[in-house]
Every structure is written in C-alpha cells, then in structure tokens.
Amino acid sequence: MQFADEIKIRPVGDVDPEESLKSEVLRLDRLTGTLVTGVVLETAIRTDAGQYILFLTDDILFEDFLNIHLLDSAGNLLDSASIGSPYSTGTFSLIRTEPPDKIRFGFIGETEWVVEVLSRPTLRIPMISEPKGVWRSRKLRRHFEIHGEPGPER
C-alpha cells in the first residue's frame, strides 16, 4: 500500500441542502465521473491490487463525518461507508498501513479504527454488521470491513 498522489477531488457545486456534500474524483488530473461523499480529501491510498481507498471529511464544524470510499483501478466506486454521529466531530489521523490490506486510523474520540479491504465482496446484514457509529447504504455486499470499538462520547 502507498499514498496515491494521483487521486484528487473537486467539490461539486449547487448541491441540494438536504443531501450530503459531494465531490468528483480526479485520477491523473482527469475527471472520472465518479461522485463521492465529502469535500476534504484527507488521504488516498493505493492498495497492492491497484484499488484506491479515499478518506474524506465534510468540513462541517461540530458535525464532521469521515467518509470512506473504495474505488477500482479505473476510479469506479465499489463501496462506501461513513463514521460519525450528529452533533459530534472528529479529526482524521492516519496511524499506519498494514500490508497487504489494512489501514489503521483515528477519527472520533480515542478509538483506533481499522479498514480491511477484502479480497472479494462478502455478504453483509444491514443494521447489525457494523460497529457503533458506522453507516452504510442498504447494499447486501461489501468490499471492505471497518473494525473499531468506540466508547461513549464525553
């Protein structure tokens, strides 16, 4: 795994105020047509398999979510998840990568989170498959798992 300097984002204007803030992904300074949630690219990492893991925040004071997106080598969105809760905020900090497939990071409180990229998609059961504070769409397959044991907020 290594940092993916070839990945950038461009925030999308004229967004519906009821929807999350979005950005378009650029790869090698070319638009990919892929929209992702978030407007601040905290870091992008290329996996050994050529996929990209993007960590983006919303840049909203006192209610910042961390959005995690997995893209294939062409920049197409494979999977997404968000970490956060209303009226809380966090600061992203990359702790380390653990080849071949894990990334450790901090975001909210003192929790050490881990994203593990899966070698193939697995079945997920909505509502009970994720740690507290992790949000995903209702898709039944996931391409990465998130591990963490957040404690109560202070």
Image: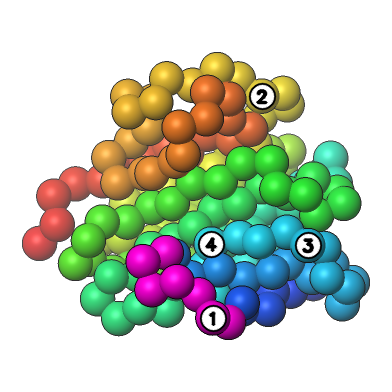
- The rendered magenta stretch, by its main secondary structure, is classed as loop
Q: Please state the extent of the stretch shown in magenta in the rendering.
A: 13-19
Q: Which class describes the residues within 10 Å of circle 2: few (<14), some (14-19), or many (20+)?
A: some
Q: Is the Cβ of the residue at disc 3 closer than 8 Å to that at disc 4?
A: no
Q: Name the image quarter holding residue 109.
A: bottom left
Q: Residue 62 — which label?
A: none
Name the one closer to the observer, 115 or 15.
Answer: 15
Q: At label 1, which amino acid type do we have?
A: Asp
Relative side of 66 to 13, left or right: left
Tell me the residue at 69%/69% (across/down). 24
Tell me the residue at 38%/73% (across/down). 17
Please tell me which of labels 2 and 3 falls first in the chain. 3
**Residue tagged 2:** 121
Q: Residue 37 — which label?
A: 4
Relative side of 90 to 28, left or right: left
Task: Please state which of the two labelled residues, at mark 4 or mark 1, is closer to the viewer.
Answer: 1
Above or below, 111 relative to 136: below
Q: Which class describes the residues within 10 Å of circle 4: few (<14), some (14-19), or many (20+)?
A: many
Q: How many marks?
A: 4
Name the one closer to the observer, 140 or 101.
Answer: 140
Tell me the residue at 14%/57% (across/down). 153
